[in-house]
Amino acid sequence: MAELNQDSGGGKKGGKVRSKKAGGRVDLTAMVDLAFLLITFFMLTTSLNKPNAMDVAMPDKNEEDPEDRLEIADNRSMTLLLGSDNKIEWYMGTYSEPIEGPEIVGYGKDGIRPILLEKLKQVPQITGDSEKGLIVVIRPSEKSTHRNLVDILDEMNIVGAKQYTIGTISEPEIEVLERDGIYND
């Protein structure tokens, strides 16, 4: 049982000697019980922060098997090269013979998003099949940041791109980024 004892005040030296009075007792058991009940209540009803994660399905790393290589039409593929200074260079088709681009844009609603939305509408019309949509290849460079990769994955989610992959950037593509000034430290 918890209790609060109060001093009776009769222990000073010098002066008159007075008789000791019995101090009052306050029972604190109910207050301690209430405190533990409140702590338990707030611990059980508090929601903790849950981490936000995006599911990305990654293929196996069996690069040697030629049967695993997927050939796609050039008019369906869009490549995004993530450079420095929060810039993206994109092109349609292959690097050696681009159908459109390369062009430098930024991230967000005024950057890559309208281009992605336009290409997502155009590609099924070009192929003549609604099942054959745009395939986006994301290639981050060494000069891009982790935040850039997260931002472009967010853009893929916002525009509703169903097929995209994260690949490795090639030396000629790095040279293009250097030439256009978005491969800086």
Image: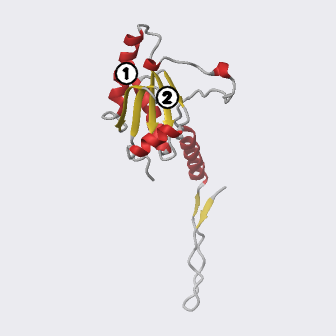
**Amino acid, disc 1:** Lys
Dot 1: few (<14), some (14–19), or many (≥20) neighbours within 10 Å? some
Q: Residue at x 48, y 41 (%)?
A: 174
167 sits to left or right of 160: right
Q: Secondary structure at mark 1?
A: helix
Q: Residue at x 43, y 18 (%)?
A: 75
Color style of the picture: secondary structure
Q: Residue at x 40, y 32 (%)?
A: 90
* Mark 1 and mark 2 residues within 8 Å of each other at the beta carbon: no
154 sits to left or right of 118: right
Dot 2: few (<14), some (14–19), or many (≥20) neighbours within 10 Å? some
| Above or below: residue 24 compared with residue 161 | below
Q: Quadrant of the N terminus?
A: bottom right
Q: Which residue is mark 2?
A: 137
Question: Of callouts 1 and 2, which one flags the residue occurring earlier in the amino acid sequence?
Answer: 1
Residue 77 placement (x, y as % from top left): 46, 22
Q: Nearer the viewer, residue 65 or 96?
A: 96
Quadrant of residue 117 within the rendered picture: top left
137 sits to left or right of 104: right
Report the number of numbered marks.
2
Q: Nearer the viewer, residue 77 or 57?
A: 77
Question: Alpha carbon of mark 1 to alpha carbon of mark 2: how far?
Answer: 13 Å
**Amino acid, disc 2:** Val
| Above or below: residue 79 compared with residue 133 | below
Q: Residue at x 54, y 45 (%)?
A: 38
Q: Is residue 162 visible?
A: yes
Q: Which residue is mark 1?
A: 119
Q: Nearer the viewer, residue 24 or 47?
A: 47
Q: Secondary structure at mark 2?
A: strand
Residue 20 placement (x, y as % from top left): 60, 77
